[in-house]
Image (cartoon, rainbow, N blue to C red):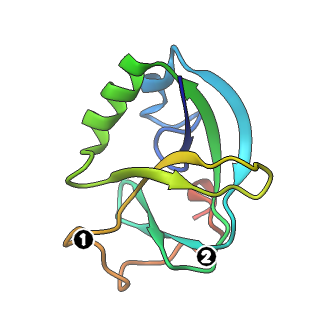
């Protein structure tokens, strides 16, 4: 079982949340203010080296769901699944981060609120 932080179209009420049907919802959380959230148009991208606290949800997923999420998110060629830090958790959780991709572009619109639903 793996804990995964989702911050965009995988969140409850968003169109890709069905990927998490078999997952256990663990609640809403915020990252440490070490990231930034960029608007890629139809989806957001969590990026490193920022100063924003990003809002999202944590789910506990089984191995099969994790494999499906990896495929859907393009891990490791588009998004890269890696551990991140949350404000209220001692242990890190996995998240899909855009860190080394041609679309890693600081010119994309910043979602200043850190919340995809409040863009």
Left/right placement of residue 99 relative to residue 58 reads: left
Q: Nearer the viewer, mark 2 or mark 1?
A: 1
The extreme front residue here reads 91
- Residue 115 x %, y %: 62, 60
Q: Nearer the viewer, residue 37 or 49?
A: 49
Q: Is residue 85 above or below residue 89?
A: below
Which image quadrant: the C terminus?
bottom right
Q: Is residue 98 above or below residue 35?
A: above
Q: Is residue 99 above or below residue 29?
A: below
Left/right placement of residue 29 relative to residue 11 reads: right
Whether pointer 2 and pointer 1 mark residues with C-beta atoms closer than 8 Å, the reply is: no
Residue at coordinates 73% horizontally, 42% vertically from top-left? 28
Question: Quarter of the image holding residue 71?
Answer: top left
- Residue 63 x %, y %: 41, 20
The extreme right residue here reads 88
Residue at coordinates 24% horizontally, 55% vertically from top-left? 78
Residue at coordinates 35% horizontally, 63% vertically from top-left? 98
- Residue 108 x %, y %: 37, 78
- Residue 13 x %, y %: 58, 34
Q: Nearer the viewer, residue 56 or 9?
A: 56
Q: Which residue is denoted by mark 1 in the rendering? A: 103
Q: In terms of secondary structure, where does tag 2 sit? A: loop
How many numbered tags mark residues here?
A: 2
Q: Is residue 6 above or below residue 80?
A: above
Disc 1 residue crowd, few under 14, some 14–19, many 20+, Cα 10 Å: few
Q: In terms of secondary structure, where does tag 1 sit? A: loop
Q: Which residue is denoted by mark 2 in the rendering? A: 112
N-terminal-most mark, 2 or 1: 1
Q: Nearer the viewer, residue 1 or 40?
A: 1
How far apart marks 2 and 1 lie (CA) works out to 19 Å
């Amino acid at each position: 079982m793996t804990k995964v932080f989702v911050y965009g179209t995988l969140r409850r009420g968003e169109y890709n949340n069905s990927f998490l049907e078999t997952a256990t919802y663990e609640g809403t959380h915020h990252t440490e203010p070490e990231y930034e959230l960029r608007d890629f148009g139809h989806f957001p991208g969590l990026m490193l080296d920022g100063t924003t606290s990003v809002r999202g949800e944590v789910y506990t997923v089984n191995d099969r769901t994790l494999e499906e999420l990896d495929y859907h998110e393009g891990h490791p060629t588009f998004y890269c699944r890696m551990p991140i830090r949350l404000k209220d958790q001692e242990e890190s959780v996995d998240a899909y981060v855009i860190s080394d991709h041609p679309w890693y572009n600081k010119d994309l619109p910043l979602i200043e609120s850190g919340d995809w639903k409040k863009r």
